[in-house]
Amino acid sequence: MRAMRLRHPWAAADGAFTPLELDDVPDPAPAEGEVLVRVSACAVCRTDLDIAEGRVVAPRYPVIPGHQVIGRVAGLGPSVSDRREGDRVGIAWIHSACGVCRWCTRGEENLCPYFESTGCDAHGGYAEYVTARADFTYLIPDLLSDTEAAPLLCAGAIGWRSLALTQMQDGDALGLTGFGASGHLVLQLAQKRFPHSAIYVFARSPSERAFALELGARWAGDTAAPPPEPLAAIIDTTPAWKPVVDSLAHLMPGGRLVVNAIRKSRSDQPELQRLDYATHLWMEREIKSVANVTRADVRALLAFAPENGLRPTVETLPLERANVALAALRTARGIRGATVLRFDLNNDTL
């Protein structure tokens, strides 16, 4: 099968930013309790970039990234009874959890110390075939196309979890810092779930700010710009520290900042020296991080999306251009919504 593999984390000494190599590798075989999935689409996530650049370290290399996978079940391992060949399924970031620790038994499998991730701890969906535990796959609603469903498996699901962690109520003002794949879905989620809440978007790029206004944001400005009113909650989806410090100053007393990022860059870490207790933290302001997702998050979002008309804005590319998609994330240029690798495309069609 064809696969885009990361042989080792990319470094500046490697030259041009092409961390993934197109290889022919043996088809995987499903083990006990697993299914084999023929991949039709895989959305590109900033976490894939974190893996490619080594901020998130895989336990072994080469590794095949990709954790927003849509495809058809092409084979069943022993003991699989709840999936059939031909089922259209999704595979998300949560590859497995132990199921017996204190966090798993409390419905917090995202915090399991034995949590394993798709596309990092296990090979992911930048390949024609992938295996996954059957009980960690999701049946995809008929109303969602492959390209619509793929970004929902992480960008949407982590947005769902982030929105829940804000603990906001309808009518509370919400801020979104950064406006990529997750941010543009959170905006639509918030509009559906909190119809009386004003949503304000902070983004460096004028095109991202314009896109946010198109989708119904009440206001859009630069990350440091003061919003029209203090905010009850802000969700940060950026890789940087500056928006964290700026956001805290925009919160009302008792407001909560939810940081939706698996890693933060060290390049602007000195921004934290601007942190002032009275300005940014006093008056019971809070900071809450988001760690991974649970299967319940993914299921809830997949049920919500078709019933409420939640649809991502998507650009499609063939598998061979995965490096192009990662490079666009790296420079934060030219992205409108989510990028999805399609396996029925090739370079000759573009």
Image: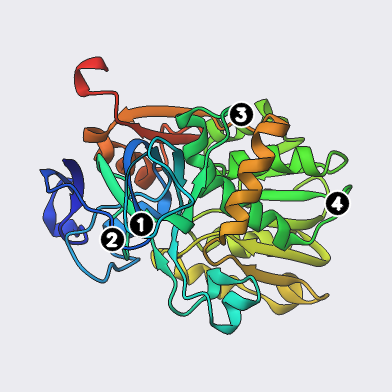
Task: State which tag comes first along the sequence, 4 or 2.
Answer: 2
In three-dimensional space, the C-alpha distance between marks 3 and 2, rounded to whole angstroms, equals 48 Å
Give the number of the mark in front: 3 or 1: 1
Residue at the image position 61 percent from the left and 40 percent from the top:
185
Q: x, y percentage for residue 137?
A: 47, 51
> What residue sits right under mark 3 in the picture?
210
- Give the CA separation, mark 4 to mark 3: 23 Å
Q: Position of residue 315 (x, y in %)?
A: 42, 27
Residue assigned mark 1: 34
Inspect the image, locate mark 1, and give the three-letter code of the amino acid beneath it. Glu
Q: Identify residue type, mark 4.
A: Asp
Q: Is residue 9 left or right of residue 263?
A: left
The answer to which quarter of the image holds residue 128 is top left
* Residue 172: assigned label: 4
Q: Is residue 119 above or below residue 207?
A: below
> Element type at marker 3?
helix
Give the class, few, some or many, for how many residues have Cα within 10 Å of label 4's Cα (few <14, many ≥20).
some
Return the residue at label 2: 31
Q: Position of residue 113 (x, y in %)?
A: 47, 80
Q: Identify the amino acid type marked 2.
A: Ala
Q: CA distance from mark 1 to mark 4?
A: 43 Å
Name which of mark 3 and mark 2 comes first in the sequence.
Answer: 2
